[in-house]
């Protein structure tokens, strides 16, 4: 069964959605996040009461507290959520957003149209740390999911078959919500994975994410991985139990042993 409908079953629990290309994040009120392989335009159709303020943001109007209307028409506006999140309102959507908010009875008493900004407090950190996995190997996903969601690690696992959108998907997130670890399975789509790795490494914020590159056991692929600055390059044994053991040891090292920069530190992860 698709995970999309269950994820949207209780829209009152959703704070907002953010999208990048063909993927979208659902940001729940309790701090949990869920990644869906659907564009935000598709989810907009399933959530008709939500307001699209920008091409990358779909908001629950029940939690909008203020709308900033710019002094000049050619400037963008802003909306403020009760979590402290602030979202830009594109110029072409601004009047539509104002009209939608003012037409909603439940929003009229909550929304104030203001002409000067006062940035709200920082939203609370996500309650669940995450691990990303990009792979076409259906054997890895259940193994890694069982490991990272266990009481030993208590992480959420997000899975994608392609990596092209990963940098665009992660870039808008607060640094504290970056994944603790990213697995790129380069045994297929090697060039795509290396290109994604390169994009992550040249970004001053995304470069902090530890990347494990999974490759076929050839010297050239291993060399390519380290030349593109993967934190670790690993090859998987063909035997199923050994694969599980390898994944668990990787998680033990990167999620429990190694020291990583916090959200206020810049620079590349060594």
Image (cartoon, rainbow, N blue to C red):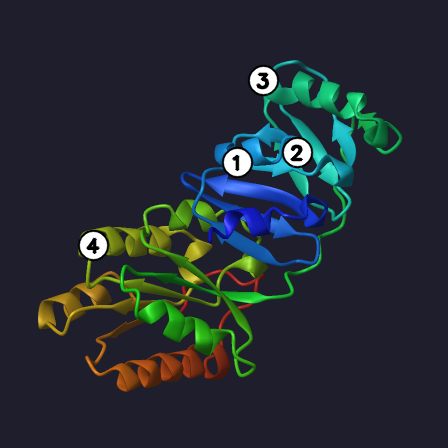
Image height of 56 relative to 103, above or below: below
> Which tag is nearer the camera, tag 4 or tag 3?
4
Q: Which residue is mark 2?
A: 50
Q: Are the residues tagged 1 and 3 within 8 Å (C-beta)?
A: no
Residue at figure coordinates x 84%, y 32% from the top left: 106
Give the Cα separation between the discs numbered 2 and 3: 17 Å
Image height of 201 relative to 236, above or below: above
Image height of 251 relative to 227, above or below: below
Picture quarter with the C terminus? bottom left
Dot label at residue 92: 3
Give the Cα separation between the discs numbered 4 and 3: 38 Å
| Side (left or right) of 106 relative to 253 | right
User: Which structural element holds mark 1?
Assistant: loop
- Measuring from the top left, give residue 33's x and y in whole percent: 58, 56
Give the Cα separation between the discs numbered 1 and 2: 13 Å
In the displayed image of the protein, which residue is found farthest to the right?
109
Q: Which residue is mark 1?
A: 56
- Measuring from the top left, give residue 47's x and y in whole percent: 62, 35
Q: Which residue is mark 4?
A: 189
Locate residue 238: give its quadrant.
Answer: bottom left
Give the Cα separation between the discs numbered 1 and 3: 14 Å
State which tag comes first along the sequence, 1 or 4.
1
State which tag comes first along the sequence, 1 or 3.
1
> Which tag is nearer the camera, tag 1 or tag 2?
2
| Structural crowding at the residue carrying mark 3, measured as other residues with C-alpha within 10 Å and reported as few (<14), some (14–19) or many (≥20) | few
Dot label at residue 30: none
- Measuring from the top left, give residue 9's x and y in whole percent: 63, 48
| Structural crowding at the residue carrying mark 2, measured as other residues with C-alpha within 10 Å and reported as few (<14), some (14–19) or many (≥20) | many
| Structural crowding at the residue carrying mark 1, measured as other residues with C-alpha within 10 Å and reported as few (<14), some (14–19) or many (≥20) | some
State which tag comes first along the sequence, 1 or 2.
2
State which tag comes first along the sequence, 2 or 3.
2
């Amino acid at each position: 069964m698709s995970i999309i409908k269950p994820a949207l079953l209780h829209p009152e629990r959703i704070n907002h959605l953010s999208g990048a290309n063909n993927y979208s994040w659902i940001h729940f009120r309790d701090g949990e996040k869920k990644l869906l392989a659907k564009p935000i335009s598709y989810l907009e159709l399933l959530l008709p009461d939500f307001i699209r303020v920008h091409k990358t943001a779909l908001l629950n109007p029940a939690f909008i507290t203020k709308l900033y209307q710019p002094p000049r028409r050619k400037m963008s506006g802003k909306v403020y959520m009760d979590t402290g999140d602030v979202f830009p309102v594109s110029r072409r959507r601004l009047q539509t957003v104002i009209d939608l908010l003012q037409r909603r009875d439940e929003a009229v008493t909550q929304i104030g149209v203001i002409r000067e900004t006062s940035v709200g407090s920082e939203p609370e950190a996500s309650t669940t740390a995450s691990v990303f996995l990009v792979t076409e190997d259906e054997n890895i996903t259940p193994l890694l999911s069982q490991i990272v969601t266990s009481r030993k690690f208590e992480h959420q696992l997000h899975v994608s078959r392609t990596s092209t959108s990963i940098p665009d998907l992660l870039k808008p997130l607060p640094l504290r919500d970056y994944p603790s670890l990213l697995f790129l399975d380069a045994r297929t789509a090697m060039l795509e994975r290396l290109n994604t790795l390169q994009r992550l490494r040249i970004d001053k914020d995304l470069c902090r994410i530890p990347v494990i590159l999974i490759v076929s056991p050839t010297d050239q692929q291993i060399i390519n991985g380290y030349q593109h600055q993967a934190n670790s390059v690993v090859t998987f044994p063909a035997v199923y139990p050994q694969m599980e053991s390898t994944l668990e040891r990787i998680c033990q090292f990167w999620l429990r042993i190694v020291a990583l920069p916090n959200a206020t530190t810049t620079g590349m992860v060594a």
